[in-house]
Image: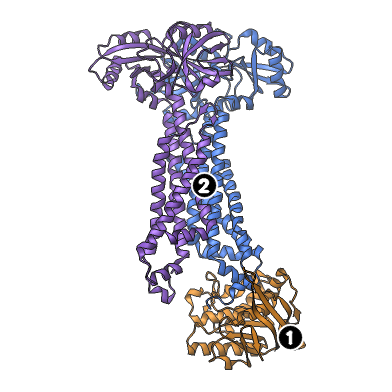
Chain colours: A orange, B blue, C purple
Amino acid sequence: MSNTNAATATVTGTALELTDVRKVYTLGDGSEVVALADASLTLTSDEMIALVGPSGSGKTTLCSIAGGILSATSGSIVVGGEDISGHSAKELTKFRQEKVGFVFQSVNLVPFLTARENLLVVDELGRRTGGPARERADQLLEELGLADRAKNLPSQLSGGQRQRVAIGRALMNDPALVLFDEPTSALDTHLGEQVMELIRQEMKTRGIAAIVVTHDERITHYCDRSVHIVDGYLQS
Amino acid sequence: MKLALLELVRRPGRFATAAVILTLIAVLLMFLGGLLDGLISSSTNAIKAQSGDVIVYSESSQASFLRSRIDPELRSTVESVPGVESTGGIGIVQLGARIPGNGPRDLASVALFGYEIPPNGVPDIPADGEVWADEVLKADGVRDGMELLLGPARSPVTVIGFVKDTTFNGQGSLWASPATWRSVLADNRPDAQLADGVFQALIVVGDADPAAIAADIDATTEDATESFTVPEAVKAIPGVEEQQGVFNQIIGVTVVIALVVIALFFALLTVERTSLYGVLKALGAMSRTIFLGLVAQATVVTLVAGVIAAGLVLILDAIIPPGAIPLDVSASRIITSIVLLLVAAVVGCSFSLRRVLRVDPASAIGTGS
Amino acid sequence: MFLALKEMARAKVRFALLIGAIALLVFLILFQQSLQNELLRSFVGAIENQTAPVLVYSVDGQRVVQASVISPDLEAGIRELPSASEVGRIGQGTFTAATAAGLFDATILGYESAAVGAPTRIVDGRLPESVGEGIASDVDEKNGFGIGDTIVLEPSGYQITIVGLAANAQLNAGPTVFTTYDTYAESVAAQNPDAGTLLPNVLGVAPVEGVTDAQLVADVNEVSLDVDALTRADAADATPGVSQVRSSFRIIFLLYGLVVPCVTGLFFLIITFQKANSLTLLRAIGAPAGRLVAALLIQATIIMVAAFGIGTLLYTPVTTLELGGLTLRFETAAVIIWGAVLMSLGIASALLAARRVLAIDPIDATTGAGVGR
């Protein structure tokens, strides 16, 4: 599988371009909550940024919108050259299958699938290439140092190993952008650093852009730059 | 779909609970169905086996042999009807048979038929004093060559062979010549005896549409007869239609119960997996994929329950002593029960469809924060 | 109470489905109970509810009245018994009867002596006194067997006028008319001109003072091996088909009855697992274990009461139905007994989940282990 998405990003130069993105929720009593206000952000093709802010600051909202999990109220979102601003739910689903990788904070892996099968989930849900996907999965497991854990269930893996499997899964579809939601929150300092090093290494060698959502200032130095967000506003 | 089946294989425990209940319900369906089939067949096999096209009773007999009588004059009227090729007389007497080797008060219930036209599976008319016996009588100790003593008059008849599926009214049948039947009837039931040439009913073989022949016969005899096609005669046997009606209603409600139980358990299972579904949707799974996976799981669980239930019912059938319960476990009944359950499974699953649709992929991000 | 109700209000669908499933099960069980009771009543009611404490069949009759024939020798032998105070002939014929409501398979039971063979539960009118009169099963009043109605036996045209109604007096699930023996004999002769001497099917016998029914049965059986004496209750139970009906329904009730606690028990087990975290939290902040178990049992009770209530409500209109000649009725005793049985089973099954609740260690709130692991 060639690095088509990453390649496109390189050609176009940007992995992510958010312009004046707003997300407004209307509550039951009619009042409005502005989760994200006029956010504009650009990521170049292999840039890795830390998105930092306290709870409720809107960082999860921004991440969700960038990843095509949530629709914005207004604004333009272009990921890996694809404008997803007006995508329908179905189109967003396809978009996520093909262009984005996610590493969630918890409930990351499917509990009844082995490490290898967890990597193959995206292919199973989407394009079903079969052989090529299996080869890629084995290759990724090898690179992540999990070759001997391929047949283990998540319950048989350590926290760090699970995180690596999640990273492998995020890379399976060769995305233009990978979103990491608090990747080190469940890990101690030493393990957290190991994971961040691995993330940086994987992102840089493949030239994939990444957003690392975190409130942990200890790890922000692994990223190219930090972007702060408070009360829905990006601090420039 | 593959994901859903993998979950089933790797985590059978959580589906086991629903499977146990579904097995119980499947056993119920098969047992009820087998009971119905057994009741009906033991009552009606002798009629079903008739090889003719039409059965003719006399008027007001309500399709009951015991209340019907066809004398020779009426018979020739029937034979004169165009479309009637030939007629065969048939008569019955129900009594207790003394079987060598059994205790003095331990009689077998038999229905002795005198016939002219052999029913399907019954050979030609035996000589006077000889009978073909239905094989259900083997459970009472009847063997080839045995002499049975029938009724209070102890009329002797010798068994020359066995036939199957000819029971009547829950009793094993004996098939004899008209003369044998007539004399046994006269000796044992003097108040019901019939003169020579008189039969209780006629089996008619015709060369036209049976329903038309039946109507013609009744018209020609000016309603001195009540004629039925063989399937109609079966249904007309008192109790048959009612039994079918009642049992089918009970079976129907049981299927609905299965549906509700499946809906319930899969709704519970879905709730447990909302976060998993959120992750899958975030990774790009469509609601349709997830829902079909659910249906696949329900189908497999139901099939497994059905197969286990079939095994249990077959065991039940084997250990129940013959005659204790009129159970007739047939492949078609087992398959019908499983199919009904599968339909219930798929419909029951659809209760969870809305919840699956509503799972928001955004819920995958930020859980725990 | 608060916890229990709040949870149910928040998760209406699942509790509604559970109540629905149990209600349907209750309905089916009660319906089939009615069916069984009525089947047995309509098949052998006439045998159980007539005046003769002991009935004597011929062995050849195999406990079927119509198939039994008592020869003159046997009858003489029984009449001579010192322990028998009263001996009366009983004859049964099954004929097609025409009434204002149509044609019916009617059973005529002729008794020689009202002391041994007449129906016991007369609810209206009187016993027949002269030839051509009869007392009919009360459930068939609407079929043209009411007091004052005349039924006509086909094809002979022999007529019988109904002068009384008796309860639980059916035989073979059809209209049954008790007449004097003379009337019965006349009807047989009219219906079958070829008939020879008429012999009684069964004898009704009553013991002399001081002799028990069981003793009388033994004495009668001594008279000859061709004779089969039974008490009235045994005769009803031994009628072919009765034990089959009882055995079949026994299995049916067992299975349906098992499904109820299985469904409730597993339901509570699952939802307890699902709210493991909240339960652990509650324990951690000080809720006594007993309180949580009580909440569980309260839910189980509410569910069982609601389900049983709905099931019984569904059952009630069905009891006015007529199914192929069987008139169902509301079986109060069955409702009470099944109510007690099913509710105890349902609530008890929730105790399985209660055990899990009691096993929660509040410390797990801090580690996040909960009940599930």
Q: Quadrant of the N terminus of chain C?
A: bottom left
Mark 2 to mark 1: distance in Å? 58 Å
User: Which element is circle 2 on?
Assistant: helix
| B263 sits to left or right of A16 | left
Q: Please, is residue B31 above or below residue C100 in the view?
A: below
User: Which element is circle 1 on?
Assistant: helix
Residue B349 visible to the viewer: yes
Name the amino acid, label 1: Ala
Q: Residue at x 52, y 90 (%)?
A: A193
| Quadrant in which residue C92 is drawn | top left
Mark 2 in CB contact with mark 1 (< 8 angstroms): no
Q: Which residue is mark 2?
A: B26
Circle 2 residues within 10 Å: few <14, some 14–19, many ≥20: many
Q: Nearer the viewer, residue B97 or B35?
A: B35
Q: Nearer the viewer, residue C314 or B272?
A: C314
| Residue B271 horizontal/vertical position (percent) | 54, 63
| Quadrant in which residue A4 is drawn | bottom right
Q: Please, is residue C214 above or below residue B294 in the view?
A: above
